[in-house]
Amino acid sequence: MLVQAKQASQAAAAMSYPFRADTPAGKQRGFQNSLDLMGLKLPFSRNAEIYGQAEPAEYVYKILSGSVRTYKLLDDGRRQIGAFYLPGDVFGIESGANHRFSAEAMADTVVLAVKRATLTALAQTDAAIARELWQITARELDHVHDQMILLGRSSAQERVASFLAEMSERSENQSEFVLPMSRQDIADYLGLTIETVSRTFSSMERRALIELPSSRKVRLKSRAALRNMHS
Amino acid sequence: MLVQAKQASQAAAAMSYPFRADTPAGKQRGFQNSLDLMGLKLPFSRNAEIYGQAEPAEYVYKILSGSVRTYKLLDDGRRQIGAFYLPGDVFGIESGANHRFSAEAMADTVVLAVKRATLTALAQTDAAIARELWQITARELDHVHDQMILLGRSSAQERVASFLAEMSERSENQSEFVLPMSRQDIADYLGLTIETVSRTFSSMERRALIELPSSRKVRLKSRAALRNMHS
DNA sequence: CGTCATTTTGAAGACTGTCAACGCGCGTGG
DNA sequence: CCACGCGCGTTGACAGTCTTCAAAATGACG
């Protein structure tokens, strides 16, 4: 069941992170132009559920401010995060009837929610919309494909380096940015434990690859060196 | 560059494995019906490259007989297999210009190759085709999403159990089937080493979960027990 | 200034990887 | 027809990376 009703009435002091909307995962301006006006603005507070795994996929979402994680849970509590979404990113698109992941706000977040039925109806007559829907799914697929090498064939160092590179590319200031997610989120994204993530950050700081003015703020001292650490 | 020309002239004694076409990844009958006639039959011999990573995606393929693996390589030789494709499955669809994986025949294989341009042109006017293309990509995404938990959060036992369950579901005889891929392929699919895969198979056989009449032939003795081992 | 969540650090252990040798099946050639 | 060679798979011993369990440190907030 959607939790929006509960959230919609909350006054959310949406906290926005300085990430660009035109990131690889966020280049959906055509989509934006044609559909922004149809959406419903919904606020979610930190850690609120936007939708749950296996729920009917009624809406497609676009982040206006804040950030979102999608994830799957195993019975014993193990969690795999599928992706992090930042302002401008679209998420929640499914071609099947139900969501395959759960989605939660990582910070107070405002999303634009568009009825899925509206989109599929439009796609019936407008090939551009149809292509747009396909493109968004294909972009997700590309990203997840990259993530597969990370999860299947990379060391902890490589995973963290790759993660930092990704966040760097998605942020306005490529060499200094604030992470919207916790260490636990990063660990569950990279298939590591929180301790290993923390140790790897510390190790990189000792080797002067990065600086950590605070646990959430990262300064990259050598982006070239970072890049050499993954793939 | 496509290697088809080289392959097309080969007389390929296409070896077909007893897998159903209507597997989760292969339910593309609408697609089949509308497009089968447009395709070009191409034979590839065992281990032949069908296309390479980063090559322009000129064709979309459908397997008539045989089997195919797609994969990415790292500079140092590490390999991650993205998927295995069996008769009836469609692969090679990209929304971008280039392939993101390489594709190789695992056995002598015959595919139906359809010009990508033809499809996208059709999709311009036919919403059903457009939806079909989207669906195929979305199904791939679903599969890869499941693979993420496997690679990020599962033990070797769980990975192999999950793999066997998947192959079982895709085969005609759910409790006895022939694997079209080598141990190395399985390892690179599951993010393990060949030794760990082999040891896990042996361990499962000792515990009477499976029988291995030959290294490629698997007989599941307790599908329920297998299912309990993953997720 | 105290409390609680989060992060970091430490020590020990487990699982998987690495390196190495052996076995098996099969095709080729003597 | 049998021996040999080769690719592939299995098994063993050991090592290493990451996890687990535990405790201390840091930081946000009332």
Image (cartoon, coloured by chain):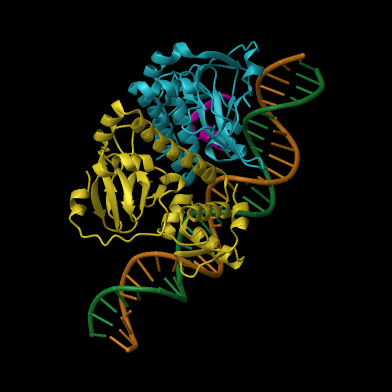
Chain colours: A cyan, B yellow, C green, D orange
Above or below B137: residue B201: below
Q: Residue at 65% of width from left, 12% of height from top?
A: A9
Could one spot residue B171 in this view of the protein? yes
Say left or right for A51 vs B40.
right
Could one spot residue A155 in this view of the protein? no
Coordinates of residue A86 in the picture (x, y in percent):
49, 22
Q: Quadrant of residue A30?
A: top left
First to last magenta residue range: A200-216
Locate the C terminus of chain A and report the quarter of the image it occupies: top left
A14 and A34: which one is in front?
A34
What is the tally of numbered marks visible in this picture? 0
Q: Tell me if residue A204 is in the magenta stretch.
A: yes
Above or below B36: residue B119: above
Q: Residue at 57% of width from left, 44% of height from top?
A: B153
Locate the N terminus of chain A and report the quarter of the image it occupies: top right
Coordinates of residue D6 in the picture (x, y in percent):
31, 69
B28 and A152: which one is in front?
B28
Q: Residue at 27% of width from left, 58% of height from top?
A: B45
B35 and A193: which one is in front?
B35
Say left or right for A126 vs A192.
left
Coordinates of residue C2 in the picture (x, y in percent):
82, 21
Coordinates of residue A72 in the picture (x, y in percent):
58, 36
